[in-house]
Amino acid sequence: MKNKKIVWTTIAGTLVCVVFAVLFFGIGFNDLHKPPIYFLILGFAGSLTLALLKQKKLRDVIFINILIYFMFAIVSSFLRPITAVILLIYFTAMVLAIYFYVQRFDKRLNRTPFARPLVLAAVMGLFYIAGNVVHGLLFISHFTPRFLLANLPIGFLLGLGFGLGAELGEKISKK
């Protein structure tokens, strides 16, 4: 039953993230400089991370995310080497946000499942702001408040995609 839930949560979360990417950013999955490819890769990695963390498989989460990151970093660094470092910042923010959400909120929100995706989306948005701070401190000499909030919508949509995917995955796996 656990493996079925992991598979369905990963599939549903990835699909919801891809739908959000198409709705908000158009189709550009072949361009590594546009958000849709990140929604596909991070949607898969985040949904799998959420599913594994809910099943208390931290070792698997660490291994899988390192593997996914290195595969995507190798491909993206052929275009621009700095992309791998920037990707590491947001990839780490995503994993930490999901871990924080599972540890602090997931069990507490069992009675209100409709709130879980929204809480996860808010947590992801806040962690993406923190990622922007780190990105700004490392690579940008003068960054503005507008820059700090630039990735908030992307983090929010990814978190909402993971959350909705987890809810759908639970519903499907119970059938």
Image: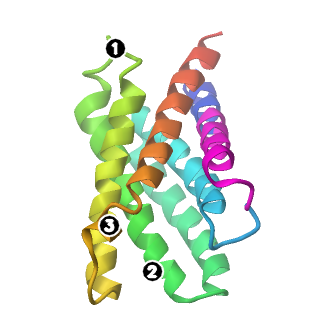
171 w.r.t. 25: above or below = above
**Disc 1 versus disc 3: nearer the observer:** 3
Is 130 placed above or below 39 here? Answer: below
Picture coordinates of residue 143, whole percent (x, y): 28, 79
- What's the residue at 50%, 87% (across, down)? 82
Rendered position, 92 above or below 44: below
Residue 111 position by quadrant: top left
Query: Residue flagged by tag 1: what amino acid is it?
Result: Thr
**123 sits to left or right of 17:** left
| Marked residue nearer the N-terminal end (2 or 3) | 2
Q: Is residue 77 magenta?
A: no
Residue 49 seen in the current view:
no
State the CA–CA distance, disc 2 to disc 3. Answer: 22 Å
The residue at 25%/68% (across/down) is 145
Q: Is residue 141 left or right of residue 171?
A: left
Q: Report crowding for label 3: few under 14, some 14 to 19, many 20 or more residues within 10 A (C-alpha).
A: few
Q: Could you say which is closer to the camera, residue 161 or residue 62?
A: 161
Q: Amino acid at mark 2?
A: Val
- The residue under label 1 is 112
Label 1 secondary element: loop
Q: Which residues are magenta?
A: 11-28
Residue at screen point 69% across, 48% down = 22
Q: Which residue is mark 2?
A: 85
